[in-house]
C-alpha cells in the first residue's frame, strides 16, 4: 500500500516526519488526490512542531518535507495554490528554527519518577495502565501522579486517553525508552485555534 493512499488521519498516526521524509524522497510526482492527503499531513505536523518547545530535528525534517512537496506539486492552479501554502508552512518553520537556534533551549531535566513510570507502562501487558494504578507502586498521591504525567505528556513522552471515568496512560508513539521527546498529536481544538492565528499572521505579513 502506497503511503499516500492512507486516510489523512491514519497517515498522521503511522508516519512521523522522519518516516514521511524517507517516503516523499522516493516520490516522482503527486496526483490531485495525493496533494490533498499530503496537505493535511503537512498542515498537522507544521502546527505540532510550532508548538514544540525544543525539537530542532523535527523542525528541520518538516522544512525539508515542505521543500520537497513544493517541488513535486504539479503545474496548474491546484499545484500552484499548494506550493504557496506549503511555502507559508516553510516560512513559519524557518522562523521556529531560528528561534530555537538563538535561544538554545536546554534538554529538560529528567523527573525523579520519570523512569519508573515509563517502565511500568512499558512492562504492562496491554501497553497502557490506568492513571489511578500508578499511585501505589510509586508511593505517591494521586494528585502528584497527575502532575508528573502532565509534565511527561507535555514533553511528548506519554499520552493520556479518557475512557469513561478512567484515564489510561500509554507511551507516546515510537516509545520513550531513550528518554527523548517523540512527536505527539496535538489536540484538534488547539490546532484549529493555532491554525487560525498562524494564517492570519501570514496574511498580515
Image (cartoon, rainbow, N blue to C red):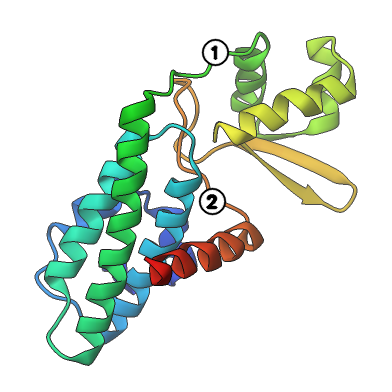
Please give the residue where the numbered disc 1 appears in the rendered image. 109
Query: Mark number for residue 101?
Result: none
**Is residue 186 toward the left or the right of residue 143 in the image?**
left
Q: Which residue is at a point 43% across and 18% down the rendered structure image?
A: 106
Measured Cα–Cα span from mark 2 to mark 1: 23 Å
Q: Residues within 10 Å of mark 2 (few under 14, many from 20)?
A: some
Q: x, y (%) of residue 203? A: 40, 72
Q: x, y (%) of residue 68? A: 16, 61
Image height of 87 relative to 35, above or below: above
Quarter assignment of residue 92: bottom left
Q: Tag 1, which secondary structure?
A: loop
Q: Which residue is at a point 84% across and 9% down the rendered structure image?
A: 139
**Is residue 40 toward the left or the right of residue 35 in the image?**
right
Quarter assignment of residue 178: top left
Instruction: Work out whether mark 2 precedes mark 1 in sequence or the reverse, and give the earlier one.
Output: 1
Which of discs 2 and 1 lies nearer the camera? The answer is 1
Is residue 81 in view?
A: yes
Q: x, y (%) of residue 113? A: 68, 12
Please give the residue where the numbered disc 2 appears in the rendered image. 185
Number of numbered discs on residues: 2
In the displayed orientation, state which residue is furthest to the left: 28
In the displayed orientation, state which residue is furthest to the front: 204
Quadrant of the drawing holding the C terminus: bottom left
Is residue 6 in view?
A: no
Q: Which residue is at a point 44% across and 37% down the rendered structure image?
A: 174
Image height of 49 relative to 149, above or below: below
Quadrant of the drawing holding the N terminus: bottom left
Q: x, y (%) of residue 104? A: 37, 23
Q: Tag 2, which secondary structure?
A: loop
Q: Nearer the viewer, residue 68 or 103?
A: 103
Q: Which residue is at a point 44% across and 72% down the rendered structure image?
A: 7
Amino acid at each position: 500500500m502506497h503511503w499516500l493512499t492512507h486516510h489523512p488521519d491514519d497517515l498522521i498516526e503511522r508516519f512521523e516526519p522522519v518516516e514521511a521524509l524517507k517516503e516523499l524522497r522516493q516520490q516522482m510526482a503527486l496526483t490531485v488526490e495525493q496533494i490533498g492527503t499530503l496537505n493535511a499531513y503537512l498542515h498537522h505536523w507544521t502546527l505540532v512542531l510550532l508548538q514544540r518547545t525544543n525539537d530542532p530535528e523535527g523542525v528541520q525534517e518538516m522544512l525539508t518535507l515542505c521543500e520537497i512537496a513544493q517541488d513535486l506539486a504539479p503545474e496548474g492552479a491546484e499545484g500552484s495554490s499548494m506550493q504557496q501554502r506549503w511555502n507559508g508552512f516553510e516560512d513559519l518553520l524557518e522562523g521556529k528554527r531560528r528561534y530555537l537556534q538563538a535561544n538554545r533551549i536546554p534538554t529538560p531535566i529528567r523527573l525523579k519518577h520519570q523512569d519508573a513510570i515509563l517502565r511500568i507502562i512499558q512492562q504492562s501487558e496491554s501497553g497502557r495502565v490506568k492513571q489511578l494504578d500508578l499511585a501505589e507502586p510509586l508511593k505517591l498521591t494521586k494528585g502528584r501522579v497527575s502532575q508528573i504525567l502532565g509534565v511527561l505528556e507535555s514533553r511528548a513522552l506519554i499520552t493520556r486517553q479518557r475512557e469513561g471515568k478512567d484515564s489510561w496512560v500509554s507511551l507516546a508513539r515510537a516509545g520513550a525508552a531513550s528518554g527523548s521527546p517523540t512527536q505527539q498529536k496535538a489536540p484538534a481544538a488547539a490546532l484549529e485555534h493555532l491554525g487560525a492565528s498562524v494564517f492570519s499572521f501570514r496574511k498580515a505579513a
